[in-house]
Image (cartoon, rainbow, N blue to C red):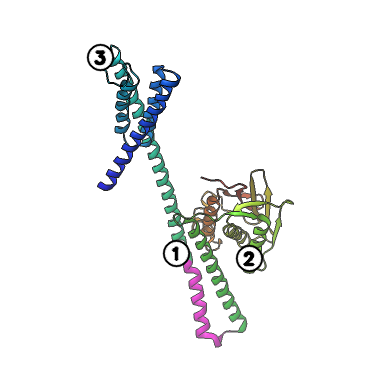
Amino acid sequence: MQKNTLKQITHDLLITVGLLLVTTSLTFILFFQVSDNPANIALFYIFGILTTAKHTNGYFYGILASGLGILIINCLFTYPYFSINFSLPDYPFTFFCMLALSILSSAATSRIKRQSELLASREKQLMEAEKEKLRANLLRAVSHDLRTPLTGILGSCTSLEEEWDNYEPEECRKLISNIHDDASWLLNMVENLLSITHIQTEGSKLNTSLEIVDEVVAESVTRLKKRLPDADINVTLPSDILMVPMDAMLVEQVLINLLENAVLHSHSEQPVQMIVEDHPHNVYFRIIDHGVGLNEEFVEHIFDGSYSESASPDVRKGNGIGLSICHSIITAHNGTIAARNHETGAEFLFILPKEEIHE
């Protein structure tokens, strides 16, 4: 602790002395080579004092720079030059005015700097709190939803193991099919959790690169078809080739989650529509179904990981987890995602910027 404090004090003193030397050098050149107007000298030193206050901690170093600046002005830029003379008639008034102005300026700069640091710290705390809230929602939802498929798998396996001879072939196939469905869902859960871990690991960054939107969409539909062979999806793409900076694997996961939700939860006999729209600065991805729609009471909270627990009973397990992960992935891409009902069903829309935003 003492070592860090000493290091900070040394750092601030070096900055104070260094900035005073730079200010004095520039002022010396101005005063003796360009113009000997005393007003220019005061402005130079006030600027140096403000810069010192900005790059050091606390009020002391700005005030120290003010006092030293007054002495340097007296020594180098007040007649007789290169000597300290406090006997000039107007010097006391000039000294105290400039010292007061310097101290006030230094104090104001330090206060603004401290407020900025507090705001940055508060914003960081809010971001951490939001991450903790998402983690808590995911953990609660995962622990709640994992029980159902695991119980189903264990129950089906136990039945087959203990009463294999008593089942008809069709009943055995049905039990095996149930095991397959629950295992597939568990695999999807693992993929989602790996996705959210990828973007929330401290210090990690998205591995973005320019990707062809058509290829990302095609890969998403292909992967979904392997899981749901009977899924009926109509895809509409712009005629021009679109290139968007993204982590292709994560965006594919978003598309798979949204398409799977639309296929499984809409209870519609019509195909799910996926429409990609090209806009000047963004690309819009719309997933539209023609089914029962969303529960309006919970639409506002549909992406926070709690939707699956509070929505209607016919919502399949894990829906809220997938949607909260979609929200996290799109937000990490500096995009936005939203959900709404239309006249004959529900629509999910997410937007990705065409150019990567550097923070």
Amino acid type, callout 2: Arg
- The mark nearer the N terminus, 2 or 1, is 1
For the residue labelled by badge 2, is the local secondary structure a helix, a strand or a loop?
helix
Query: Left or right: 329 with respect to 238?
Result: left
Amino acid type, callout 1: Ser
Part of the protein shown in magenta: 146-167
Residue 53 screen position, x and y as percent: 36, 32
**Mark 1, residue position:** 143
Label disc, if present, on residue 223 of the rendered structure: 2
**Mark 3, residue position:** 87
* Secondary structure character of the magenta stretch overall: helix
Q: CA distance from mark 2 to mark 1?
A: 26 Å
Residue 341 screen position, x and y as percent: 62, 50
Q: Residue at x 41, y 20 (%)?
A: 32
Residue 152 magenta-highlighted:
yes
Query: Which residue reaches farthest top?
Result: 89
Q: CA distance from mark 3 to mark 1?
A: 82 Å
Amino acid type, callout 3: Ser
Of 99 and 126, the residue lying toward us: 99
